[in-house]
Every structure is written in structure tokens, then in C-alpha cells.
Image (spheres, rainbow, N blue to C red):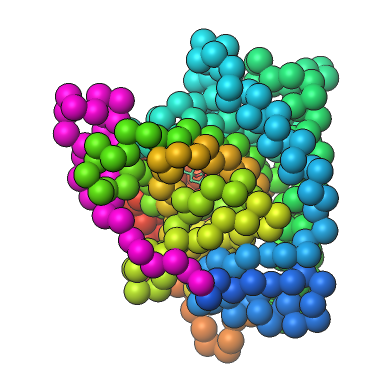
Amino acid sequence: MVVVSQPVLENFANIKTCKPTSNIFTEIPTVDLSDPDAKTLIVEACKEFGFFKLINHGVPMEFMDRLEADAMKFFNLPQPEKEKSGPPNPFGYGNKKIGPNGDVGWVEYLLFSTNPELFSQNGKFIIPGISESFWCFVNEYVSAVRNMACEVLEIIADELGIRPRNILSRLLRDEKSDSCFRLNHYPPCPELQALRGRNLIGFGDHTDPQIISIVRSNNTSGLQIALKDGTWVSVPSDHSSFFINVGDSLQVLTNGRFRSVRHRVLADGLNSRISMIFFGGPPLTEKITPLSSIMEQGEESLYNEFTWYDYKKSSYKTRLSDNRLGLFEK
Ligand SMILES: C=C1C[C@]23C[C@@]1(O)CC[C@H]2[C@@]12CC[C@H](O)[C@@](C)(C(=O)O1)[C@H]2[C@@H]3C(=O)O
Ligand SMILES: O=C(O)CCC(=O)C(=O)O
Ligand SMILES: [Fe+2]
């Protein structure tokens, strides 16, 4: 990776670029949630890729369309209007700067907590400048996607022999669940040609710290995942499906059986990309440790014991591409 030279492309100051990859992930594991074989396919995909595509998921298309339209309305506001909802701390509107430690990308975003106490107060949305309708559409979408994420986690529990089967899903349903929701807007970048064949990074490579992330985007591609051998592959977009990422916490809860997927987003030269991601996280006090019901006799945890609070605190001191889990490996 290189940093774009100054002052030629001042707009892109500090935004990284990467070599173009021609690998399209054509064999992307695709799971039909209504298929009786879904459980085997989900578990295989989580072990091999930490990633799969979900179809027939039961989340109404109107929920996605309504939210996407309101999100676009927000991102089309004049810059000073949007800035009324920022800076992110970590919740709120952010532009180019990702997290507190100097990461930047060709992206603007809104980050919300889904914890009711941090989402709204006295019937008012906690982030200023967000309309009532926008707030309702976020709520409607997040509730439906959370339910679907819980169904996936229960299927995983069944297939791995984890008892009780709601041991993972209850972490997302808990009223103190530290889940969050992100709307990302990657504006088109017509100046891309000036980068002489390199790609501009929209959202730099990273793994998600939570248990599970549910990604939905419009029909502009850009998402890439890293395979086990480190090769980057492009995920063809599909606006009616969800893409599911295993997060660091699920890697630990399964004692490394599942793999937390490294992913990134590249900017597009012509089209705007909108993505909506639900990050399913546990309550802050929850211990993130391998589930006893999957451990074989004599098997030891690969990780030192920590709570979600410890992990989150440590994560916010890291740069996006750091190996955050490495700090907790035995
Ligand atoms: C650079 C950072 C942004 C991030 C917090 C962090 O310090 C490291 C993890 C990042 C990440 C990646 C997944 C999600 O988008 C996110 C909300 C999260 O929980 O961890 C972001 C954080 C962020 O943007 O605040
Ligand atoms: O925008 C996307 O598709 C993915 C973004 C992402 O990985 C994140 O917000 O953590
Ligand atoms: Fe991510």
C-alpha cells in the first residue's frame, strides 16, 4: 500500500491506495435460510471464510429500501448540515476519519448505538439532526436484522452442539447488548484515473470486533474479503441479500473454529455505494471465552480471558488494520 502523493490529489490526503485485484469471489458460499441444509453450509462457511451470503432471509425489502432512501437524503445534505450530527464520539456523523487513531477512507458515515439508552432519550434521537422518519426506519430495520442474526446464531449453536441454543443469540437480545449500527456512504470518485490504475481505499482492511456483522449494500460493488492465504477477492454486490461476517468475539467463543474475516471496501469511480451494517455485540460485562459445550476433552483456550469491555477498550486504542485479537492470544 502507498499513500497518494501530495499536492496532486489533496482531496485524498492520507487515504491509502492498493493494487487492483482481478479476483472475483465467484464461489461465495450462498445459504438459503429456508433450506434444511442451511446449518451445515453456514458452519462450513464460517470455518473456511468467516463469511457467507444469505438469501431468503425474511427481512422485507421495503425495510432496506426505505432506510436506504432516507440515508441517501441525509448524505445529500449540505456538508455543514451533516456536521451537525458529528463529530463521532464514537457515535454520530463522520467524514473520512475512521476511529480515533488516524485511519482515513473515502467514506462518510453515521454510527449509532442500538442500545435504547444510547439511541434515544425522552423520545428524541440522541444524535442531533436526525429526522423522526429516519430514526423510525433505522429502528424498524435494526429490529428485523437483529432477529435474523439471532436465528443464524441459533442455527450455528445447533450445528456445533452448543447448549442452550440461545446462548449466543441472547447476547444480542439482552437489553444491555452493546450492538451498533453503521450507515456508510462511499461517494463516487471520478478522479480515480489520476491514481494511475491503483484503487482508492473506501474503508481500510480490518476484522470486526463483535460477534457477528450483517452487511447489506446497494448494487455498487467494492467489498473485498481476504481468504485464508491472504488473497483479496471481490464480492459481487447483491442489494437483496445479506453478507454475514464472523467477528473476533465469535472466533474466540468457538476457540478458533470460526475465523473472523478480514475485509475492506474500495471506492468506485462512477457510482455511490451505500452500506448498512448491524454489528451484533454482547453486554459490556460479558466474558468472551470459548463456550464450554464445544470444548473437547483436554482442549485449552487459545485466548486469555477477557470481557467485552476489555476488548472494546483495547480495540479503540488500535489502528483499523491491527491484529486486535493478537493481544489476547496465549
Ligand atoms: C479504527 C477504529 C475504528 C473502529 C474502532 C477502531 O479503533 C478499531 C475497530 C474499528 C471498528 C471496525 C468495525 C466497526 O465498523 C466499528 C464501529 C467497530 O466496532 O470497530 C469500527 C470502529 C469505529 O469506527 O469506531
Ligand atoms: O461498507 C461495507 O460494506 C463494510 C464496512 C465495514 O466493514 C465496517 O463498517 O466495519
Ligand atoms: Fe467491517
Rendering coords of residue 141 (x, y %): 77, 42
Rendering coords of residue 136 (x, y %): 81, 30
- Against 64, residue 243 (above or below) is below
Q: Can you see residue 75?
A: yes
- Against 74, residue 313 (above or below) is below
Q: Residue at x 25, y 49 (%)?
A: 197
- Against 83, residue 186 (above or below) is below
- Against 155, residue 225 (above or below) is above
- Position of the C terminus by quadrant: bottom left
Q: Is residue 268 rendered to the left or right of residue 231?
A: right
Stretch of the chain drawn in magenta: 1-26
Q: Is residue 74 rendered to the left or right of residue 144?
A: left
Rendering coords of residue 296 (x, y %): 58, 86
296 magenta-colored: no
Q: Residue at x 63, y 65 (%)?
A: 53
Q: Can you see residue 305?
A: no
Rendering coords of residue 262 (x, y %): 43, 59
Q: Considering depth in this image, is 330 or 179 the residue closer to the camera?
A: 179
Q: Residue at x 59, y 80 (%)?
A: 44
Task: Specify the quadrant of the image occupied by residue 74.
Answer: top right
The furthest residue to the top: 80
Q: Considering depth in this image, is 188 or 263 the residue closer to the camera?
A: 188
Task: Specify the quadrant of the image occupied by residue 101.
Answer: top left
18 magenta-colored: yes
Q: Is residue 258 rendered to the left or right of residue 64?
A: left
**What is the magenta segment's predominant secondary structure?**
loop
Q: Residue at x 53, y 68 (%)?
A: 50
Disc tally is: 0
